[in-house]
Amino acid sequence: VQLQASGGGLVRPRGSLRLSCAASGFGLEGYAIGWFRQDPGKEREGILCISTDDSGTWYADSVKGRFTISKDNAKNMAYLQMNSLKPEDTAVYYCAVKLGLYYCSGLPSEYEYWGQGTLVTVFS
């Protein structure tokens, strides 16, 4: 079971990035997916999730209206579309999954498997 997050980089404020989360060794169908981020010295923060059956999503207030989560079960991929980026969005971003989570959770402790993280830097 492996997750790999990618797509991070440098971007100007108000720019956009799309992060990808590739699953291998298992199929994403049946898994809830969460995206998290972490600044050095801070706790890992849940920012969005989508439940196992896609019936529920949750967005942290800090990203609501700017970030979108999606998944493509056929490609075994999940995505985080980030628009209108701000300097305070700078962090390492992680994707994580949990089998059979039929509600949406932003708590890191709820998730079983984690990708390695990808760095997003928003700078003026």
Image (cartoon, rainbow, N blue to C red):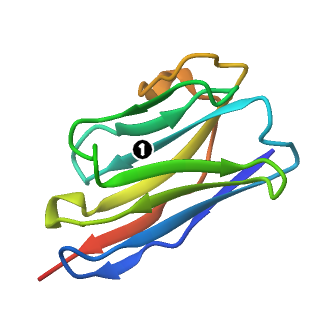
Quarter location, residue 45 = top left
Q: Where the C terminus falls, by quadrant?
A: bottom left
The residue furthest left is 124
Instruction: Pinpoint residue 82: horizontal percent, then vertical percent.
Output: 37, 62
Callout 1 secondary element: strand
Instruction: Pinpoint residue 114: horizontal percent, then vertical percent.
Output: 60, 43
Instruction: Pinpoint residue 93: horizontal percent, then vertical percent.
Output: 42, 56
Residue appearing at x 65%, y 29% in the figure: 112
Residue appearing at x 57%, y 57% in the figure: 79
Residue appearing at x 38%, y 59% in the figure: 92
Examine the rendered structure and indicate whether residue 47 appears above or below residue 68: above
Say what amino acid the circle numbered 1 marks. Answer: Phe
Residue appearing at x 70%, y 26% in the figure: 53
Relative placement, left or right, of 119 versus 54 is left
Q: Which residue is mark 1?
A: 36
Number of marks in picture = 1
Examine the rendered structure and indicate whether residue 38 appears above or below residue 91: above
Examine the rendered structure and indicate whether residue 18 appears above or below residue 77: below
Examine the rendered structure and indicate whether residue 119 appears above or below residue 110: below
Q: Residues within 10 Å of mark 1 (few under 14, many from 20)?
A: many
Quarter location, residue 106 = top left
Quarter location, residue 17 = bottom left
Relative placement, left or right, of 71 versus 81 is right
Instruction: Pinpoint residue 119: horizontal percent, then vertical percent.
Output: 40, 68
Relative placement, left or right, of 77 versus 111 is right
